[in-house]
Image (tube, helix red, strand yellow):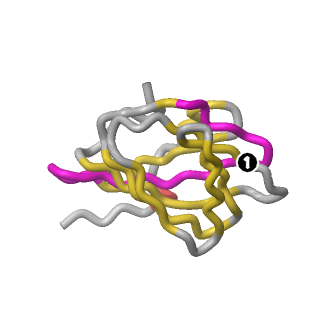
Amino acid sequence: MDSIALSNRDVAEATDGVYLAQLAAGDRMSIQHFRIEPGATVPEHSHEHEQTGFVYGGALTFVVDGEEVVVGEGDSYAIPGDEPHAAENRGDEPVLGIDVFSPPRLDVPWE
């Protein structure tokens, strides 16, 4: 078993104000931590990986097929693989959360 502290992981700025830290990864899934600063945007992208996540601070507005979905503190979400999506922090505080990807997504920042 591996135990990995967030404080021991490298943090990558994937795009302005969007910070990702790869945590643990296995053969069939991986987990990463994210911090998205106020006003920062994750541009629309897609990937083969199924993505589930949990927000534990702030609120994140996802845009999927032109529809906006706000995911707030204590909320979780699921995004099917290959579904284009974007996200934006429209609040006044950083958004903090975790994402789980299957299969593992090891390309931080994303391509």
Camera-side residue: 70 or 66?
Answer: 66
Q: Position of residue 64 (x, y in %)?
A: 54, 42
Magenta-drawn stretch contains 9: no
What kind of secondary structure does the magenta stretch mostly adopt?
A: strand
Identify the residue at horizontal 15%, vertical 49% (top origin): 27
- Answer left or right for 87 relative to 99: right
**Could you tell me residue 67's position as x and y percent?**
61, 45
Residue at point 79%, 43% (across, down): 39
Q: In the figure, 52 relative to 62: above or below? A: below
Q: Is residue 105 left or right of residue 56?
A: left
In the picture of the structure, the residue carrying the numbered disc 1 is 37
Residue found at the very far right of the displayed protein? 92
Q: Quadrant of residue 41?
A: top right
Residue 47, located in which quarter of the rendered image? top left
Looking at the picture, how far across and down is residue 58, in whole percent? 70, 64
The picture places residue 84, in percent across and down from the top left corner, at 47, 34
Magenta stretch bounds = 25-44
In the rendered view, would you say 26 is above or below 56? above
Mark 1 Cα shell of 10 Å, populated few (<14), some (14-19), many (≥20): many
**Which residue shows up at 41% across the image and 50% down it?**
79
